[in-house]
């Protein structure tokens, strides 16, 4: 059996996850076989198969980020996800890390605010 290949930017995602290590209710898990972050068991961020960061944000915020060209709407099959957006890695690793940290923080706050209504 061949060893599993690491996903693109898994090291960057690990650095994002490390920033949440000491926070109550935060743990790591998987989403679509990719590393993810959860608050109270609900996923708020994960690494996409193409190496971009995918986060859950309020629908209006997600739409604004897509309209500005900062994010890409996530599509599952033919269904466009209202609250999930992807942030591709940029050429500048430091800029990617800063953006991803900011977006993961916003996603964590949002999903945590949903309480038991998040899926």
Image (cartoon, rainbow, N blue to C red):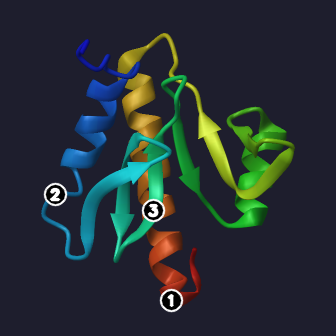
> Residue 60, position in %: x, y?
78, 63
Up/down of 41 relative to 83, above or below: below
Question: Element under label 1?
Answer: helix
Q: Nearer the viewer, mark 1 or mark 2?
A: 1
Q: Are marks 1 and 2 in contact (CB under 8 Å)?
A: no
Q: Looking at the picture, tell me which residue is in the foreground, 95 or 42.
A: 42
How crowded is the residue under tag 1: few (<14 C-alpha within 10 Å), some, or many (20+)? few
Distance of label 3 from label 1 (alpha carbons):
12 Å
Q: Looking at the picture, tell me which residue is in the foreground, 83 or 90.
A: 83
Residue under the point 25% across and 37% down: 14
How crowded is the residue under tag 3: few (<14 C-alpha within 10 Å), some, or many (20+)? many
Residue 42: name its quadrant. bottom left
Q: Residue furthest left?
A: 22
Which label is found at residue 21?
2
How crowded is the residue under tag 2: few (<14 C-alpha within 10 Å), some, or many (20+)? few
Up/down of 57 relative to 35, above or below: below
> What residue would you read off at disc 3?
43
Question: Element under label 2?
Answer: loop
Up/down of 78 relative to 105, above or below: above
Residue under the point 22% across and 50% down: 19
Image quarter of the C terminus: bottom right
Q: Residue furthest front?
A: 1
Q: Are marks 3 and 2 in contact (CB under 8 Å)?
A: no
Q: Is residue 94 left or right of residue 107?
A: left
């Amino acid at each position: 059996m061949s060893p599993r290949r690491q996903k693109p930017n898994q090291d960057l995602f690990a650095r994002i996850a490390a920033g949440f290590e000491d926070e109550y209710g935060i743990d790591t898990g998987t989403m679509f076989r990719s590393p993810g972050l959860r608050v109270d068991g609900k996923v708020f961020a994960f690494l996409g198969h193409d190496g971009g960061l995918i986060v859950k944000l309020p629908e209006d915020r997600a739409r604004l980020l897509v309209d500005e060209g900062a994010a890409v709407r996530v599509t599952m099959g033919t269904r466009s996800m209202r609250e999930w957006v992807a942030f591709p890695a940029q050429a500048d690793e430091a800029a990617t890390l800063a953006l991803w940290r900011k977006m993961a923080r916003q996603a964590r706050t949002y999903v945590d605010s949903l309480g038991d209504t998040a899926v």
